[in-house]
Amino acid sequence: MREQRWPWLGTAALMLASADAAGWSTYLHWVPCRGSMLRGSIVHDYSYDYDGGSFSDLCLRRMDGDRGPWDLALYVLALALAGLAWLTLVLGMRWQLRTKAVAALPGLFTLALAGAEAIRDAALGQDGEVLLILVAGIELSAVAALVAVWQPDVDGRRFLRLLVVLWGTT
């Protein structure tokens, strides 16, 4: 039985888009600190940065984990695209329904994490327990998915590709 290529191509496109969104999110997150990051290096005393206030207030907030609207939106988009990439691959594979159900869990947890991150400031506040549970769910379900997709008919090369996509999702 010949393997279909569309799930792999769709997954690759979604993962590239996810990586692009994550890169822009990281860039936008650290833009307020541009130009002031090397002042606390080995050459200078670290206390100068905190006592002298050479970092801007926005930069200090970013260091504490505060996110801006655009970098948060791109981060949520990156999470959602990573989850969709795995789900596209899982639903496109010719596996039994039970295998697909177990294998889909990491993608579903990733989408749930994207949703929780999107509404965190509005509904959940700074409560990190829900986010921690979802992250742990992603990791545990990834192990279960890995066991579920490791079938006797899966060759090493295809399993390695599945592993790379699953790693990108988690």
Image (cartoon, helix red, strand yellow):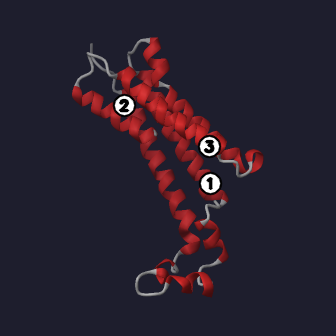
Task: Tell me which amino acid carries mark 2.
Answer: Trp
Task: Tell me which amino acid carries mark 1.
Answer: Leu
- The quadrant holding residue 160 is top left
Position of 84 relative to 132 (above/below):
above
**Badges 2 and 3: C-beta atoms under 8 Å apart?**
no
Residue 12 in view = no
Relative to the observer, which residue lies in front, 7 or 78?
A: 78
* Mark identifier at residue 131: 3
- The quadrant holding residue 133 is top right
Instruction: Name the element at disc 1.
Output: helix
Furthest-left residue in view? 156
Q: Earlier in the sequence, mark 1 or mark 3?
A: 1
Position of 18 relative to 40 (above/below):
above
Give the residue at x 38% y 16%. 94
Marks 2/3: CA distance? 29 Å
Q: Is residue 97 left or right of residue 58?
A: left
Residue denoted by label 1: 72
